[in-house]
Amino acid sequence: MISVRKEEVLRGPHESKIYSDFSHLYDKIFSRFFSERIESVIADLAIPPGAEVLEVGIGTGLSLPAYPLHCEVTGVDLAPEMLERARQKAEENRWRHFRFMEMDALNLEFPDNSFDFVTSFHVVTVVPDPVQMMREIYRVCKPGGMVVIINHFRTTKPVLGPLIGALDPVTRLLGWHASLRLSDAFAGVPLRIEKRFKTSPTSLFTVVLARAMKETGNGNGKLHVVRPGTE
């Protein structure tokens, strides 16, 4: 996945065996747990023709089959081994609507307001600075664009929350944080959460759909939200 090295972090995700040494096993390990959920969420977005989509932390490309052929998808990741597997999938299936770039989620190398949709699946808890990642996602998303996050967030339930949080030192060795709360990840980032749900009552993962609240530059100083496909 995508991250940068910080000394205070026990292990960055791209340094974890799950994300680098075992990149060739990633699909076998995680596809059965993640793919169906990701594909369902993307399908429900009803991405319009011509939409520009960015997926942050595309990994080996578990999500590739879900994106419609009529949009343009840029997938970024810091792990070259995983990006190569994603490229191979696109080539084998003759999908021409993807491009892949090695890039840091905390420093996205795109101009402001570049994408209609920005997606990120199971990534925000593996970066050293989740808020900075969300700020970058917000920055490159167009005014009124949709941000789609799927991730595990620490529950606010009084008993279960501290119990899961206690596992954080262990999960950090594997490259992800168990203690991150959704409210902390979105803190101070001007994203309006429009929908938040779990795909099943027993799921550990939360789906978040948020709108990028920005001025469109129409000169009247008022916020005008433009939804993807309506410009």
Image (cartoon, rainbow, N blue to C red):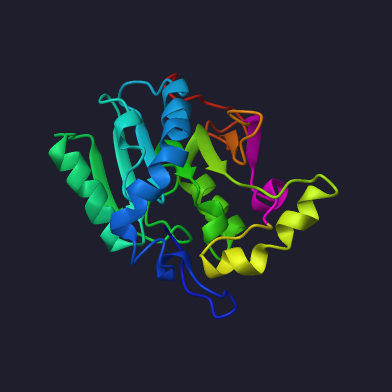
Q: Nearer the viewer, residue 55 or 160?
A: 160
Whole-percent x and y of residue 15?
42, 71
Image check: 60 left or right of 93?
Answer: right
Residue appearing at x 23%, y 34% in the figure: 97
Whole-percent x and y of residue 220?
61, 30
The residue stretch that appears in magenta: 180-197
Rendered-image quadrant of the C terminus:
top left
Whole-percent x and y of residue 102?
30, 59
Q: Say if 129 sits above or below 47 in the image.
A: below
Residue appearing at x 44%, y 68% in the figure: 16
Total marks drawn?
0
Residue appearing at x 65%, y 48% in the figure: 153
Q: Which of 7 and 52 is in front in this view?
A: 7
Residue 58 in sight in this render? no
Q: Is 121 a magenta residue? A: no
Image check: 180 left or right of 60?
Answer: right
Rendered-image quadrant of the N terminus:
bottom left
Q: Say if 198 sits above or below 139 in the image.
A: above
Residue 30 in sight in this render? yes
